[in-house]
Amino acid sequence: MTAVTTGGTVPAPPKADAVPVPAGPPKVKSDRTKANLATAMHGEALAHAKYMLFAAHARQTGYPATARLFEGTAEVELREHFAGEAVLAGLVRDTGDNLRTAVTGERHEATSMYPEFAERATAVGDTAAARFFRDTAADEARHAAAFQRELDRLR
């Protein structure tokens, strides 16, 4: 942050070379490579979300150039890295398959993941986290229902 506090220059944000993500099967054979791609995609998605939050904070606290740096890097993480990994992993399929994948994921979060997180948080006295996890589980259930309605509509 020396540049920010001493009047130096903040590096220009990188430009993302957007990778198109067509629907299709995985481009890799190995289960280990598929698992590595899943791990990498989670990391890139988290980096994108995290950098966008960092950018919002930088902008709110008077560092617009730093915000642009975070935003540009976030775009590279999403549109270049995540997208390239998604192509290799065959993440995007036809719309029906994509909806079924979404329903399965949202239902898991609503019925297993977040309720378990809430239970664990309650057990150790983290009541705010437990409440947040319960509320999020309810949101995820609504998402699953919306995706299911759309899937039913397409049939």
Image (tube, rainbow, N blue to C red):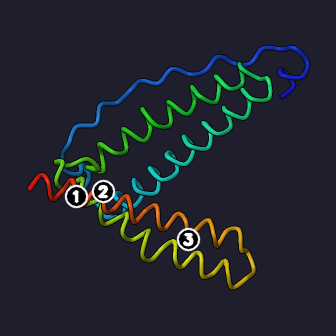
Q: Quadrant of the N terminus?
A: top right
Q: Which residue is mark 2?
A: 146
* Quadrant in which residue 155 is drawn: bottom left
Q: Which one is earlier in the sequence, the residue at label 3 or at label 2?
A: 3
Q: Residue at x 33, y 62 (%)?
A: 144
CB under 8 Å between discs 2 and 1:
yes
Vertical position of residue 123 compared to residue 80: above or below:
below
Name the side, left or right, on which 17 lies relative to 64: left
Work out which residue is located at the far left of the displayed protein and give it.
155
* Quadrant in which residue 9 is drawn: top right
- Three-letter residue code for mark 2: Ala
Numbered label attached to residue 149: 1
Work out which residue is located at the far bottom of the displayed protein and give it.
123
Q: Residue at x 30, y 66 (%)?
A: 104
Q: Which residue is mark 3?
A: 134
Q: CA distance from mark 1 to mark 3?
A: 23 Å
Element class at badge 2: helix
* Residue 61, position as x, y percentages in the image: 80, 29
Foreground of the two, 109 or 134: 134
- Three-letter residue code for mark 3: Arg
- Three-letter residue code for mark 1: Arg
Foreground of the two, 53 or 43: 53
Vertical position of residue 88 compared to residue 15: above or below:
below
Q: How dense is the environment of label 2, judged by Cα within 10 Å: few (below 14), some, or many (20 and up)? A: some
